[in-house]
């Protein structure tokens, strides 16, 4: 009997996969990763485990990976200012390599022959999971039942689940496809497939629309140490809690909504709604701090690296050598990135309003238009003549 470790979410698709693989002679071990998608209560976790077992799993692993996710995936993304196509802070994309890492680890521990996932054949996530698993252990077989199976609609899957007495809550109408973790939420499908339509307010799960946003601004001050957020308003916090807190206050003020028609790796354009209040605030603050402490050449070159780094994350190449090499560059830039940024959250906007750093390169005596001016304006003339010389014919 072949053994397979399945990335299990507890939803309809992956529950049907358990049974489907079981019917094809596999022993199925389920692995559910908690990346801060709000599994929260022990009740949810117990229900997920029970569902997997009823569907035919021989064993269920549920692991709280939030600290590892934040420490090993989100921190590098913050340092690199990782953002895809100017809008997507990569929450889903950052979670996949970690899930794949544990799929492989559990497969080794259980002596399994294969790993499996519930992604369709049209998205990026299949690529991220399979490329990562392939890098970590090229000998493991990879199964993607949703690409192969006979079901053509959600209704057929529900019927299959019913027939096999898998406890699925089908009363919950699910107008969207949603992926969520502590770094953000990705929402697609349903009415969102019409590019001309504004997303209905019920699309959003953690950010308030204008009607519910407070009428007064909220200020937050974030302190970074070598590029890593450490304190909010002077209070040291564990990064996981710091992000959760910013998700909460940012969400109240409607910060971090994004509506993006993006280029998927498989060549399709798709429309996705993102909610990432904490990530938006930290991205904005981190970039602002860099603008104060990095010199011009380093800063501009880092922007180029940032683009490439984001593509690597999006395209499933987290464990590539190029990503590792770029980490070397990014980390070396972060030694100056210590200081505080104060931001104003108001009616969906997140604007830096104060900056403080012992590594600041800002020299008021040089930039001032006041009488304390120390900039020798006479030197400008020679500088400009030599600077412009190559362009005169
Ligand atoms: N488009 C995003 C990405 O490729 C999110 C994918 C998952 N989205 C979803 N709604 N299930 O990273």
Image: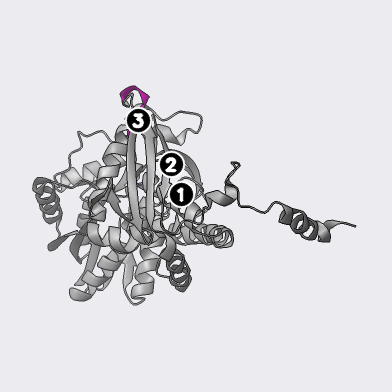
The front one of 71 and 336 is 336
Q: Distance between the residues labelled 1 and 2?
A: 7 Å
| Quadrant position of the C terminus in the picture | bottom right
- Quadrant of the rendered structure where residue 157 is? top left
Q: Looking at the image, tell me whether mark 1 or mark 3 is earlier in sequence order.
A: 3
Using the rendered image of the protein, determine whether residue 206 is visible from the camera's viewpoint. Answer: no
Span highlighted in magenta in the image? 202-212
Left or right: 88, with 182 as reference point: right
The residue sitting at 54% across, 58% down in the picture is 299
Tell me the distance, in whole angstroms, between the alpha carbons under discs 1 and 3.
19 Å
Task: Say if mark 1 contacts mark 2, CB within 8 Å.
Answer: yes
171, 351: nearer the viewer = 351
Q: Please report whichever mark, 1 or 2, sits nearer to the chain's N-terminal start.
A: 1
Q: How far apart are marks 3 and 2 (CA)?
A: 13 Å
Numbered disc 2: secondary structure: strand
Circle on res. 352:
2
Looking at the picture, the colour scheme in use is one colour
Report if the beta carbon of the residue with label 1 is closer than 8 angstroms to ligand 1. Answer: no
Mark 1 lies on residue: 288
Determine which of the numbered discs, if any, sits on residue 217 in the image.
Answer: 3
């Amino acid at each position: 009997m072949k053994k397979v470790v399945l990335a299990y979410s507890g939803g309809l698709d992956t529950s049907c996969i358990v049974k489907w693989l079981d019917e094809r002679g596999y022993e199925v071990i389920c692995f559910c990763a908690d990346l801060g998608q709000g599994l929260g209560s022990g009740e949810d976790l117990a229900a997920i485990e029970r569902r997997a077992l009823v569907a035919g799993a021989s064993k269920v692993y549920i692991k709280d990976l939030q600290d590892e996710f934040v420490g090993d995936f989100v921190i590098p993304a913050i340092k690199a200012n990782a953002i895809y196509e100017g809008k997507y802070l990569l929450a889903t994309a950052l979670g996949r390599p970690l899930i794949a890492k544990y799929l492989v680890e559990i497969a080794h521990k259980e002596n399994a022959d294969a790993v499996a996932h519930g992604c369709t054949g049209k998205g990026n996530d299949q690529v991220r999971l399979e490329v990562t698993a392939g890098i970590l252990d090229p000998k493991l077989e990879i199964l993607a039942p949703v690409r192969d199976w006979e079901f053509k609609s959600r209704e057929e899957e529900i019927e299959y689940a019913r027939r096999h007495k898998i406890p699925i809550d089908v009363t919950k109408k699910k107008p969207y496809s949603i992926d969520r973790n502590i770094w953000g939420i990705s929402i697609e499908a349903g009415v969102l497939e019409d590019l001309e339509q504004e997303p209905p307010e019920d699309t959003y799960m953690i950010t308030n629309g204008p009607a519910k946003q407070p009428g007064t601004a909220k200020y937050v001050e974030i302190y970074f140490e070598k590029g890593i957020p450490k304190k909010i308003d002077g209070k040291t916090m564990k990064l996981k809690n710091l992000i959760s807190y910013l998700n909460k206050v940012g969400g109240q003020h409607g910060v971090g909504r994004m509506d993006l028609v993006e280029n998927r790796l498989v060549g399709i354009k798709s429309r996705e709604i993102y909610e990432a209040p904490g990530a938006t605030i930290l991205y904005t603050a981190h970039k602002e701090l860099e603008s104060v402490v990095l010199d011009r050449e380093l800063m501009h070159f880092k922007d180029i690296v940032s683009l490439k780094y984001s593509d690597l994350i999006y395209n499933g190449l987290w464990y590539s050598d190029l990503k590792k090499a770029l980490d070397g560059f990014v980390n070396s830039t972060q030694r100056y990135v210590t200081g505080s940024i104060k931001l104003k959250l108001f009616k969906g906007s997140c604007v830096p309003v104060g900056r403080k750093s012992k590594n600041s390169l800002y020299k008021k005596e040089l930039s001032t238009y006041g009488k304390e001016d120390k900039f020798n304006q006479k030197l400008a003339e020679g500088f400009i003549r030599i600077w412009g010389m190559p362009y005169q014919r």
